[in-house]
Amino acid sequence: DAMVIQNPRYQVTQFGKPVTLSCSQTLNHNVMYWYQQKSSQAPKLLFHYYDKDFNNEADTPDNFQSRRPNTSFCFLDIRSPGLGDAAMYLCATQNEGSPYFGPGTRLTVL
Amino acid sequence: GEDVEQSLFLSVREGDSSVINCTYTDSSSTYLYWYKQEPGAGLQLLTYIFSNMDMKQDQRLTVLLNKKDKHLSLRIADTQTGDSAIYFCAVKAAGNKLTFGGGTRVLVKP
């Protein structure tokens, strides 16, 4: 059974049109992460939640926001996507053990 | 902050052993992970090692940790064509932040 679920798997948006990516987990983990991965590069941490405590990375653009309404769900909002925001977006969760990643959402910006 | 480095590419013949190397800079790193990523997919956790261990073996996978040199390696025995992928080393230090290396692309030739 899938433990970290990301929807949609593929998202196409237009330049400047807001988009929301979704992540849900069945593991009841208290930490949830959002990573951005561009082609052939390492995943880059955007932000993470420890329960409801939000932690933003210093170099994450203001264009990226996140919401965690409950333990199971976390959303990534991109307010005005640019061409440079086209990437794979990976959600991960963790408790005491190892981080588990979802399958990712590939975002295309036209 | 933490810096994690990996070689870019490894070519190996089917049936041989593969060794993927990783170096890191933060001596306070607690957990060290190896993830596998196939094209268009998320990150699959392969194995991990805690910083007070020197070695961990899990079926075909052997992880070696040299804390003094801040060097981590992943050995894959009897490499198969299905092992062709990008392998990421990731290091967790204080807090919840995971820092990834740039990934090593492994190509298994028949």
Image (tube, rainbow, N blue to C red):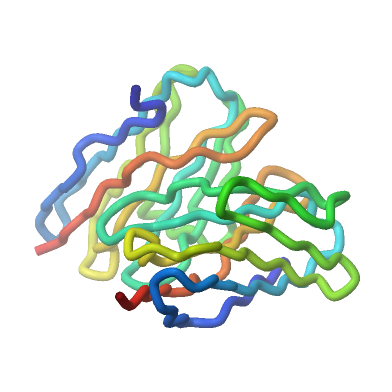
* Image point (49%, 63%), residue name: B78
Q: Is residue A17 left or right of residue B21?
A: left
- Quadrant for the C terminus of chain B in the image: bottom left
Give the percent coordinates (x, y) of residue B46.
53, 49
Q: Position of residue B84 (x, y in %)?
A: 36, 66
Q: Which picture quadrant has residue B32?
A: bottom right
Which quadrant does the N terminus of chain B fall into? bottom right
> Is A36 on the left or on the right of B92, as rendered?
left
Q: Which x, y percent locates residue A40?
A: 36, 73
Query: From what the image shows, is residue B94 above or below residue B22?
Result: above
Residue A57, image quadrant? bottom right
- The reply, left or right, for residue A69 in relation to residue B73 is left
Residue in view at x 83 percent, y 67 percent: B66
Give the answer, above or below, for where B30 lies relative to A6.
below
Classify residue A99 as left or right of residue B67: left
The residue positioned 59% from the left and 73% from the top of the image is B19
Q: Of residues A109 and A37, which is closer to you in this image? A: A37
At a point 56% along the width and 24% down the height, the residue shown is A29
Q: Give A11 or A68, whichever is nearer the viewer.
A: A11
Q: How many marks?
A: 0
Residue A52 screen position, x and y as percent: 57, 25
